[in-house]
Image (cartoon, helix red, strand yellow):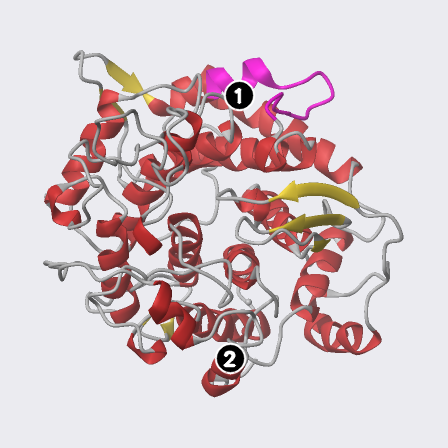
Amino acid sequence: MIRFKWQSLFLHAQAFRACGRPSVSRPRSIGPMNHSLCICVAAATAHLSLHATSQADGLNQADARDKATTLPLVEVGAVQPPPSTVHQIAPQGESPLGASQDAAARAAMQRGIDWLRANTHDEGGWLSDLRAAPTDTTTSQRSPIGAAVTALGLKAFVQAGGDPASDPMLADLVADLLARQQPDGRFDAGNLSTYVTATVVAALAALPEDDRVQLAVHNAAGALRDLQWTEKDHIEPTLDWYGGAGYGKHGRPDLSSTQWMLEGLQAAGDCAGDTHLLGCNCDNDPARRAAITFLTRCQNTKANGASWAGEDGGFVYTAAGGGESMGSQAAGEGRYGETMPAGEARSLRSYGSMTYAGYKSLIFAGLPADDPRVIAALDWIRAHWTLAENPGMGRQGWFYYLHGLARAMSAGGHDRIVDVHGTAHDWRSELVDVLVSTQRPDGSWINEETRWLEGHPEMSTIYAVLALQEALKPAS
């Protein structure tokens, strides 16, 4: 791969796009994708262009309305500016960890980064040759998932202090990602555009300040807003698709895609289309307010309004189309709750990774700590506190879960969580212990439960490194 100087990345990116990119003759197959990122920033005037592609992506607005279910209106409530995003770990000895754990976390992180550097794909980045199908399709195709995985890997390097100006490998990765940006701002024109665009935004927003990168981030943040189902798509607030984002415009919204959309806006500091990489200061952002409606409907609380909803405060995979839960599927009750025991009313089970995603998303959307939905989610977390598994899913998606837990605890400003038994847990300390003890001798991590790409050490290692970095960031 050609080495690019940081100062000319933008021009090289445009040339790289024009030249195309090499193909892979025998890409690896990963099967159907689901809620993990495993399965997942250009002009400001591209709004109409993006909407013109929605039908080509596989689902037009009329189809969406036909598939949506009508529910009672959600009361959004009072909102506040979301917390600022921290893009760098703390200097050595200045993290919230004790001295010995700080050293252990940094050593494990560096070994993971060294492994990633030594195991890039021939094309650059990680998992660049995979084939996959989203959960609501059966057709395996060349997947842009490699771009999303590569973006997260780039973020891991940059948060540890990596700089494309002095690191040719990182300069190449940035140029490759910039070259993927479409005229409408997305970083993937197909049916994984939300995942790919959000993760690339998160990576680019962590880079040292650069006008061209900031422009790419700004345009991609606008594309993420366009990927959200709202009134602009003739989806009213009474429909259960409202406020959510899906893999792209091709299908129904889900909580994982929605949390990545919010992650992208949060990383970019984007409020109502105004991007400030130093943080978001608005408290009346229509995209975030719409997202609160969808998040509320994915939560097992009385505020949900759906017939399947319980009251444990946890989250399911999606409220759209009557609701789905991987937790229900894992419990043998069917992904849609269609195989509940005879005589029991249909319900959907909350589970760990989606509850942390929901809790973090409520905070990024601007709900205050005393909002009943935030309190209910935190109560579920207290009742199901563990780092040994993804509650309700066993070890499936475990590294995704650990990363989500760390991001949520950071977003909530928590140093400790007191569980329902009254035991206080220092989440940073427990997380470091778990990840240090499960790191392989070569510096990588891998999950024996291979679902959602975690059988690939590239994916598990990136999640593990990012989780360690959350523990090493300054306390909120």
Crowdedness near tag 2: few (<14), some (14–19) or many (≥20) residues, C-alpha within 10 Å: some
Q: Is residue 185 left or right of residue 373?
A: right
- Secondary structure type for disc 2: helix
Q: Is residue 417 above or below residue 204?
A: above
Residue 270 visible in the snapshot: no
Q: Which mark is residue 50?
A: 2
Examine the residues drawn in magenta and state their main secondary structure.
loop
Q: Nearer the viewer, mark 2 or mark 1?
A: 2
Q: Earlier in the sequence, mark 2 or mark 1?
A: 2
Q: Which residue is mark 1?
A: 435
Residue 381 placement: quadrant: top left
Tell me the magenta residue range: 432-449
Query: How far apart, in angstroms, are the residues tagged by discs 2 and 1?
Result: 41 Å
Q: Residue at x 42, y 32 (%)?
A: 329
Mark 1 belongs to which amino acid?
A: Leu
Q: Residue 243: within the magenta?
A: no
- Secondary structure type for disc 1: helix
State the image coordinates of residue 132 (x, y, percent, origin top left): 67, 49
Mark 2 belongs to which amino acid?
A: Leu
Residue 99 placement: quadrant: top left
Q: Residue at x 23, y 21 (%)?
A: 383
* Quadrant location of the C terminus in the rendered image: top left
Residue 365 placement: quadrant: bottom left
Q: Residue at x 18, y 45 (%)?
A: 307
